[in-house]
């Protein structure tokens, strides 16, 4: 059963989202990854506010896996930086978990299919590719 997020969870999620965008984009630019756009598409916080799931949209998409691995390995630094920025708003910093948000890529594949470029009737193997895991 999935419950609706409380106002507090939404507010904390949006505070984390705003600051994470700034931290991650600055780190990518300083790390020499110019031309890479990192956006935080969603931050969902658990009811007890101990865990925050961070969904990242990364452009260009071919850099996503590599970038998320780098972000995961720097998670303690990112969490510390985030705690510094939000110390007046949050007593405890939630544990951060990062995921690639591939919804835009999925939407693009659906659009390609609708335009007739991929025809699952002629090529049944395409159906497996379009299943959302």
Image (spheres, grey):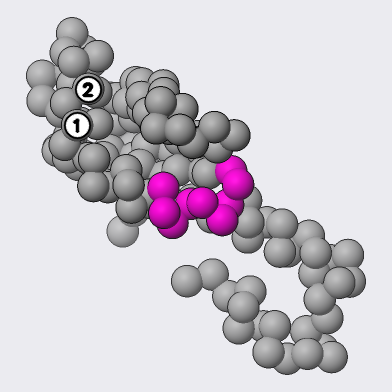
Q: Which mark is residue 77?
A: 1
Question: Which residue bears the numbered disc 2?
Answer: 81
Compared to residue 18, the image places residue 9 above or below, namely below
Check the image and name the residue furthest to the right: 116
| Drawn side of residue 98 relative to residue 132, left or right | left
Q: Is residue 19 visible?
A: yes
Compared to residue 122, the image places residue 75 above or below, namely above
Compared to residue 82, the image places residue 115 above or below, namely below
In the image, 34 versus 133, the foreground residue is 34
Residue sitting at 73 percent across and 64 percent down? Answer: 110
Q: Quadrant of the N terminus?
A: bottom left
Residue 21 spot, x, y in % from top left = 43, 27
Residue sitting at 86 percent across and 72 percent down? Answer: 117
Element at label 1: helix
Residue 13 spot, x, y in % from top left = 34, 29
Q: Is residue 21 visible?
A: no
Check the image and name the residue furthest to the left: 91
Check the image and name the residue furthest to the front: 32
Task: Decide: few, some or many residues near mark 2? Use Cα within 10 Å; few <14, some 14-19, many ≥20.
Answer: some
- State the predominant SS element of the stretch in magenta: helix
Residue 99 spot, x, y in % from top left = 38, 51
Instruction: Say whether marks 2 and 1 touch (CB < 8 Å).
Output: yes
Query: What is the magenta range?
Result: 59-67
């Amino acid at each position: 059963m999935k419950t609706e997020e409380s106002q507090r969870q939404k507010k904390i999620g949006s505070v984390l989202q705003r600051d994470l965008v700034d931290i991650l984009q600055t780190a990518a630019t300083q790390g020499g990854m110019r031309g890479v756009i990192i956006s935080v598409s969603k931050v969902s916080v658990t009811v007890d506010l101990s865990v925050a799931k961070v969904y990242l949209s990364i452009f260009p998409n071919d850099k996503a896996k590599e970038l998320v691995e780098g972000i995961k390995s720097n998670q303690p630094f990112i969490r510390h930086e985030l705690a510094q920025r939000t110390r007046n708003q949050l007593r405890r910093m939630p544990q951060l978990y990062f995921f690639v948000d591939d919804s835009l890529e999925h939407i693009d594949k659906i659009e390609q299919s609708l335009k007739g470029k991929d025809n699952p009737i002629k090529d049944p193997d395409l159906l497996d590719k379009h299943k959302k895991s």
